[in-house]
Amino acid sequence: MGVCSSCADSLTVIKLICSRMCKPRNRVSDLDPVGAENWSTNYYQQERLRRKEQKWRTLLHPSVFGACLAIFGRTVVGPIVLLLLFTATNYLSPDASFLITADNRFFAFTEKDLSMAGGCTDCLGTCKIVLLTYAMYNKEILTSGPPFTAFTGIPPTELLYNFGSLGPEALALGEALDASDALCQSSVNEWGSAMNVLTGTAQQAKDVITTLNLSISLQTRRELELGIERTKECVTTWSIIALPRLFLFPLDQNSTGFGEIPAVAINIAPDVTECRPDVPMDYTLLSSKLALNTNGRDLLATVPEALTLFPYSFNSSMPPVSRVVPASETKYTVDSVLEPLLHAYYGACRVHEVNSTGIFIEDACEISDHWASYGLMVQSPDDMPLCSTSDVCIHNYYNSQWEWVSEISTAESNRVAMYMNTFRSRYADKVGISVLPGLVVMQIFIMGMVSLYEVMSHKRSVLLTQIWAYRCQNGKTQVFYLAQVAYHLIYNSDLYLLGFSTGTLTTESLANLTCCFYAFSYSFINLAKSRSGDQQLDRHFRLTWEATQVVITACVVTALRVVQRNPLESIISTNAEILRKTSALGARYCGLNDACIIFTINAPTIITLLSTILGLLAVTTSLLVKRTSPNVIRAVLSSRGSQGSFRGVSPVKNTTMARKIATIRFSRKKRSQTIPVERLTMHYRLTSFEEHCLGVPFRRLFYDCDDFAYETYNGRRCTTVEALLLTGYLYYGEHIYQATNVLLLVVARMLPRKLLRTFNVLILRWHLNPATGKLTHALSCTWYTASKDNHALNGMTPVA
């Protein structure tokens, strides 16, 4: 009996325990009739049904296309292009250069080259003085530099000269030239070079040569004769130019080490280069003689690189160079011009050929012992660098058969302006490139993709795209972007302008400039917009500005590629001043360089003006879109799918209070945005999000978002998902976090959990009740604890 009673007692205890374990408990949904179903589950089901019922025609709305263009350009096209820049070019290579180097030099012709503009002051005189200087040659081809420089250094005043050596014909010719429009210059020009120049018609140039019996090549004589015959076909003046030129002569066998010697030679050329007749060199018309037997040694078998850049008038083992040079922007609009030929001399005689046998010269020329002591003299190109004040130089190897256009200055009657027609081979000093602009754009793209993930990971709409654009365009990072790019532009402003004006920017520099323009214009307009005093979403501007950046950046790339090898001479003519070392300012800024350039307006100023214009264009476009678009509230509700069970609630309407009549008004002035909470009905009291997170009504922060700030869900007035995201809060698991803390949680998903224990970082979060949709007060926890939150557990729901 005892055993049976004990068994019965045991069964009774077990039944009691089971009954208590199986007894149903009161859940939140049972206690709160509003939350009869789970708050989040019901919302997801309704969203899923809405998406199924949504017609595809809603995707054809212009706002959808704008949103897709903005997102696609910012998060797909931009990162891909930046990745190609980093991987498919030399952008990250140690060999990347700001300006083109000697390995990538390029050859070009420029008519009236503004980078070589100069002149002379008080150099005009009577033509008898110029003829007297030409008479120094006395049938010789070359003359020494020192006596020529001393003679031309005398001011062009008749009383200082003795014209007894000129015959009656020469004096009469001088008077005839003075009576015509001929210009006669004898002085030291602004380059510091002595010169003797006569500019007149082709017939006048021939008369000077015939009267003074000047020694010129057969080719030049024939060019001048054809120029006289074609005077009406190609109108131009001709110039007889006597200048000191540099000649190189070989020192050792099979060595590029050549000696240098200056000498004065005469060249005759049309002022308009395309008017030069095509007269090929034909030495069969002139007999040659062997001036020097080299016993099988070719003196020009090994030469400096400078001697291989331009065509020469004699035959040799040097690689041939074509005289025909492509041309653009010429006076008579031609596709190509003929380059003048450089010469070589031996014993002051023109050289016809140099080979392993020896040096062959004109048969009728008598060798000068003075000049023969230097051996073979090959005319060298002139290296005339144009440098910045930071001592970075653009090296220009010019064809030293100088040709220019002389014009009397309108501003100074005693000054003659000279505009060179230049044939040049150009490259620049090696300057390492900075990758800072590329890194800034990478930061912008990364933050854009992170914001897109945060805002639109659970829900997608045009309105959310506008909110994403707002979050990208505002924040402390905009100041950081602008500061980095402004530093780069200020530091490298002269190099960019120098590269543009000379056509020497590399592809990597163009990529840098594109990144600078994108980052600077983007952050500058964003800061200007945020500091305008308006706290608003301005939804039409946001996507317009993002889409405009995609289009404008593509246009900038195209424009930069077009002008990469075409020097922008307008920069020099309107925004720069070229200083010669012989001037007072040149001595101050140029240092040891022959010439330097200073700019009036720097690159940041130019980009700021262009950015402002683009910003105004985006604002104007957004205003047009706003005026031509349908009703804003209807469009927003459509984009959010707020039909059926979703009813938008606008707080901007008059409400009659139970105890006292009061009208709620909202002003755009923040100081007047006060709400007497104690006098509001329950319908207009703060939501839990406003109470625990914002501390003020949402309207206090954004006054242009009343159409989507609130909605009625499950019979309660709730803060919408869009409003919560707009204020900088994000959903993550069962909590609401600030956006900066969500970044930490995203990073935590990629780090070992044990590693997070070493960081003493506190995070604030607000728990979202899944049954009632309400937020708790702020809760603090460590980074490690917050990382346990299951990010895939919950999504975006309205907050009661």
Image (spheres, rainbow, N blue to C red):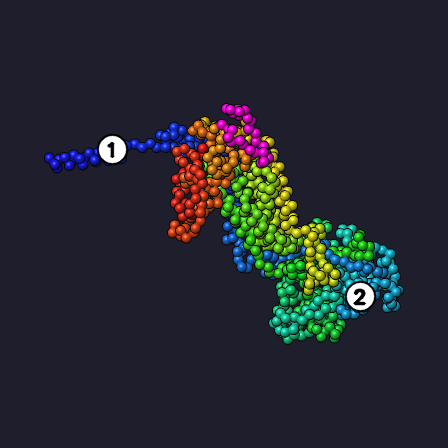
What residue is shown at x 61% (from left), y 72% (from top)? 254
**Residue 396's image quarter?**
bottom right
Q: Mainly helix, strand or loop, the magenta region? A: loop
Q: Is residue 641 left or right of residue 114?
A: left
The spot of residue 222 in percent (x, y) is: 75, 60
Q: Which of 420 and 88 lies nearest the eye of the viewer?
A: 88
Q: Is residue 118 left or right of residue 50?
A: right
Start and end of the magenta stretch? 655-681
Does residue 671 belong to the magenta stretch?
Answer: yes
Q: For the residue marked with disc 1, what is the amino acid? A: Ser
* Residue ID for mark 1: 19
Can residue 553 be seen?
no
The spot of residue 784 in percent (x, y) is: 40, 48
What residue is shown at x 63% (from left), y 74% (from top)? 252
Mark 1 touches mark 2? (CB < 8 Å) = no
* Residue ID for mark 2: 153
Q: Give above or below for 375 relative to 772.
A: below
User: How busy is the neighbourhood of tag 2: few (under 14 within 10 Å), some, or many (20 plus)?
Assistant: some
What residue is shown at x 68% (from left), y 64% (from top)? 592
**Residue 381's image quarter?**
bottom right
Q: For the residue marked with disc 2, what is the amino acid? A: Gly
The spot of residue 319 in percent (x, y) is: 62, 64
Does residue 465 belong to the magenta stretch?
Answer: no
Q: Is residue 397 left or right of residue 740?
A: right
How far separated are the C-alphas under marks 1 and 2? Answer: 123 Å
